[in-house]
Image: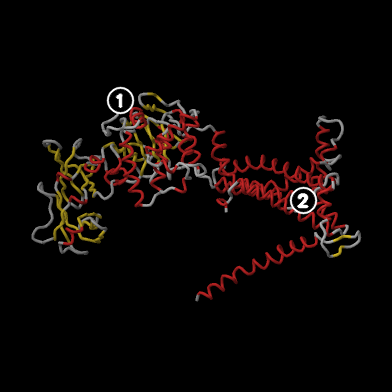
Amino acid sequence: MLNNKNLSTYLLVTPQTLIFVLFLVLPIIAIAIVSFWNFNGFAMTPGFTLSNYLGIFTSKVYLSTYLNTFKFAAIVWLICLLISYPVAYFLAFQIKSPQWQTIWFLICTVPFLTSNIIRMIAWIPFLGREGLLNQALMGLNLIDRPIEIFLFSDFAVVLAMVQLYCLFMIAPIFNSMVRIDRALVSAAEDLGSSSFQIQKEIILPLSAPGIAIGSIFVVTLVMGEFATMRLMSGGKSSSVGYLIKNQIDSLQYPMAAANAIVLLLLALIVVALILRTVDIRKQL
Amino acid sequence: MNISTSTTATTTSKNQSQIEQALQNNAAGVLMNSVTKKYGSFTAVEDLTLEIPAGYYCCLLGPSGCGKTTALRMIAGHEEVTSGDIFIGGRKVNQIPAAKRSTSMMFQSYALFPHKTIWENIEFGLKMQKVREAERRTRVGEMLDLVGLSHLGDRKPDQLSGGQRQRIALARSLVTRPQVLMLDEPLSALDENLRVRMRTELRKIQKQFGMTFIQVTHHVEEAFSLSDQIVVMTHGKIDQVASPEELFDTPASQFVAKFMGDNNIFQGKVINCVQDSDLDLIQLEVEGLGTIFCRGHGVVIGTEAACSIRPDLMFVEPYSPDLPAKSSLAANQISARITAVEMTGYVTRVCLMAESTGQELLYKVRTEDWRSNSLHEGQLVVLSWSKDNCIFLAY
């Protein structure tokens, strides 16, 4: 009996474990191994060298790319948070009927009905030199020559990323906000809180798990970005993801692997820091 | 229009702490004067006039949608009055916002802040009032002492038992020294056992502080066991204001008699009314059942009215063809058939059906007493009760 039960438990977890091991653990191990291999300019050769890692930490170009990646992650995270918190609050607290909450939430997801790349490309005719935005501003006589920084700039990168990833922040914050007992808000009001104090003392702390989960999504997604970076900056700005992609294109696999490992560790550190600050278990 | 702010003599303990004394001196009465609340065309509370003396435990009792919660929220200031005035301790509060009304509210399931410690929960109201840190510390400490939970200051609410949570919720509400404490169905989310214990404790704490408590409930037993004063409401109006005993013995209307639970009600026409020593003796003609004698006053002969008899004040005996059931001044009698017998513990509920009209009736008897007779389901019996226990209901 007992054996049978044990066996069925093991069988039940087997598929998930297999997928996990085959498609996540093994590839990462492979990448970690390759990151220590040699590269002679044409091909990689098995071995053990730290030169790939030393290269990363001693090269100014690499370091500034890492810094740039962090900068974008931080900016996009902050803007996403500033947009998502009020949106989630509106959905959770101002819309009373659950039906309308669902409808409004679905409206938020409409942009996700098209692929990432298409959505980014759609920005180009809008923001470009001859784009809709510049034409509209010129038509209104607000500017007399097209503004260049709308497209192929850091601004464009941030804009596109915010649009891409905002929902990943809205959803978890909304999710933790709808779970807040409305009586808590009434109780705080009754005890003399202003609406600002209610935000600060009640709603913000209680939606912190949602904010943390959203932050993990946004930060890790932005840190691994390369397509948006390439497309929207017009190649002017670089990220670690884009760097790795270039190195793979030029067959520098050990270097790309070393970068991937460093990026992975950095992302994990950020996630660990977020989890240390906020207890997200209540959310799960 | 002024209500005395002096406290009643419910508390007579000698060694009262400062807070207890402060709270008791603070306790204020509440007066609602022709208060009406409308939501669009819907009238939630209509022309409500009610006086709750200081230090009383008052329950607003009624079915859901009767306006009791709206009334409570208007006193607390969470809801504006459409017309009429509300006074707390003689001060008109219509224009004063909730936070400045010196009332405090205890919510369903207590609404303790789950992310704050017990200490922070209690401190919250003082912090919002910008009380200085040093004073906050003393007052929260005192309050925790008073509810006997000083050792739990660092815990979070979910680490507390139901009873401890209630005491913390009370402490949080009382630390700002309100004049009146409102309780919005605080016990309704609890399971039966805990509810009874929490109820006892609520009453104990109310007596300890000599505070004015106003509680909303739809639970008759809860209202009976807690209150000095019960306000029965229906359709936004007050049906009866009375002490629990009075309400139990002499419901004022058919609605109240029904809401109290199991009273048997007979509707009929007043055919005679005789002045008697204290209460008039009234003769009611019930269609199909004959005459029923009851006590009451304010009676107009010829009007449609009703009377009510408590199910525990009736007697049952086997029917015998020699003595058919017939009401007299000695006893009201009707014949009925037993349809079901439910043993519920100490009490046995006997469901009956009037033989001539089919009206459902209920008889309650001590289980021990029921066991000593030989009556059984399906048997025809005579139900009898005294005219003096039968309460006339004018409406």
Q: Of the numbered discs in the image, which one, if any, rests on residue B65?
A: none
Task: Pick the residue in front: B335 or B182.
Answer: B182
Q: Residues within 10 Å of mark 2 (few under 14, many from 20)?
A: many
> Residue B245: which quarter of the image?
top left
Q: Position of residue B357 (x, y in %)?
A: 22, 55
Relative to A137, A2 lies left or right: left
Which residue is labeled 2 in the image? A225
Q: Is residue B307 visible?
A: yes
Q: With respect to residue A140, does B266 lie above or below?
A: below
Residue B49 versus residue A234 in the image, above or below: above
Its colouring scheme is secondary structure
Q: Is residue A108 visible?
A: no
Q: Find out whether the residues at labels 1 and 2 contact each other: C-beta distance under 8 Å.
A: no
> Image point 57% across, 52% down: which residue?
A281
Which residue is rendered at x = 83% and y = 59% of the image? A49
Return the chain for callout 1: B
Does dot 1 land on a helix, a strand or a loop?
loop
Horizontal side of residue A25 vs A140, given as left or right: left
- The answer to which quarter of the image holds residue B364 is bottom left
Q: Amino acid at mark 2?
A: Glu
Disc sitting over residue B4 in the figure:
1
For label 1, count other residues whose C-alpha is less than 10 Å away and answer few (under 14), some (14-19) or many (20+).
Answer: some
Residue A274 in picture, x, y percent from top left: 64, 47
Q: Is residue B233 left or right of residue A132?
A: left
Quadrant for the N terminus of chain B in the image: top left
Measuring from the top left, give residue B198's x and y in whole percent.
35, 46
Q: CA distance from mark 1 to mark 2?
A: 72 Å
Q: Quadrant of the C terminus of chain B?
A: top left
Q: Secondary structure at mark 2?
A: loop
Chain of the residue displaying label 2: A
Amino acid on which disc 1 is placed: Ser
Q: Residue furthest right?
A: A42
